[in-house]
Amino acid sequence: MPRKQRKPSEIAAVKKKILKNAVALMNTNGFEGFTMKGLARMMGLTAPTIYSYYNNKDELYLDVLTEGFRMLFNKMKRACGSHNDSFGKLRSLIEAYMDFGLKKSNFYNLMFTWHVPKYNDYIGTPMEHAARNELMTALKVTDFSLDIIKECAGGEHHITDEDARFYLLYVWSLLHGYISGINNTLLDYMHETPLAIKNRTLDLMERTFRKELERYKPKQKKAG
């Protein structure tokens, strides 16, 4: 009797479970120490079952990254959607990124912290298409952030793309340092309760950005 064909919803549900377990195991064993057999054993499945959803370790890894960037992008977009004020959007975007990094640390480590394969490592390999899909998903986060920064500066005609990218790299470096320091407990040796300064950190970032980006806007002429 032929095997019953699985519904797309059933396939999606199983793949979601595989991704959840895969990202946890990668954080435990590292990318190099991660194996499909180890994942199958962790999930109480056989290796062929895992391979029926993913052809190899790299395909699964790239799907993990793609899902991580998709979650981050959607979180940032939702956070900004409740604001009409451009700087309100920027504050919400920064806060959403920080929240993702702290609460989804397993994904964040793979996406931003660890030395793991990137798109260029897959060029010319069978995984290039999957790697490009992951890269395009990641760049949506970058492009969305740049759009918010440009909006705060009064629009694209007020700030150069180079300047906007500089500010994006600047704020990302600050955020990444704080998030990584929390996740790897390094900040515990520098502050009794590093999470307690989260809002103060966000406030300072917002004030700094407001001061920097508002100078791009045209000066209002005084009446009379």
Image (cartoon, rainbow, N blue to C red):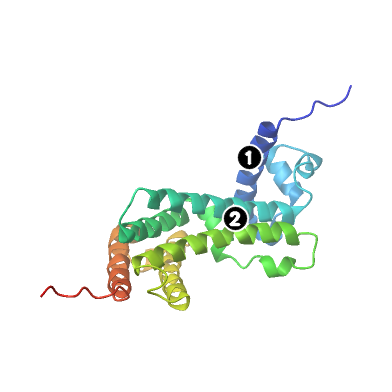
Q: Is residue 130 above or below residue 41?
A: below
Distance, label 1 to label 2, CA atoms, is 16 Å
> Could you say which quadrant of the image residue 195 lies in?
bottom left
Q: From the top left corner, tell me how far across and down residue 109 is, in percent.
A: 55, 60
Name which residue lies at 84% across and 27% down. 3
**Callout 1: few (<14), some (14-19), or many (20+) C-alpha neighbours within 10 Å?**
few
Which residue is disc 1 drawn over?
17
**Callout 2: few (<14), some (14-19), or many (20+) C-alpha neighbours within 10 Å?**
some
Residue lying at the far right of the rendered structure: 1
Q: Tell me if label 1 and label 2 are in contact, CB under 8 Å.
A: no
Amino acid carrying label 2: it is Asn
Name which residue lies at 44% across and 57% down. 97
Amino acid carrying label 1: it is Lys
Question: Is residue 217 rendered to the left or right of residue 2?
Answer: left
SS for dot 1: helix
Q: From the top left corner, tell me how far across and down residue 77 is, in percent.
A: 45, 52
SS for dot 2: helix
> Could you say which quadrant of the image residue 134 lies in?
bottom right
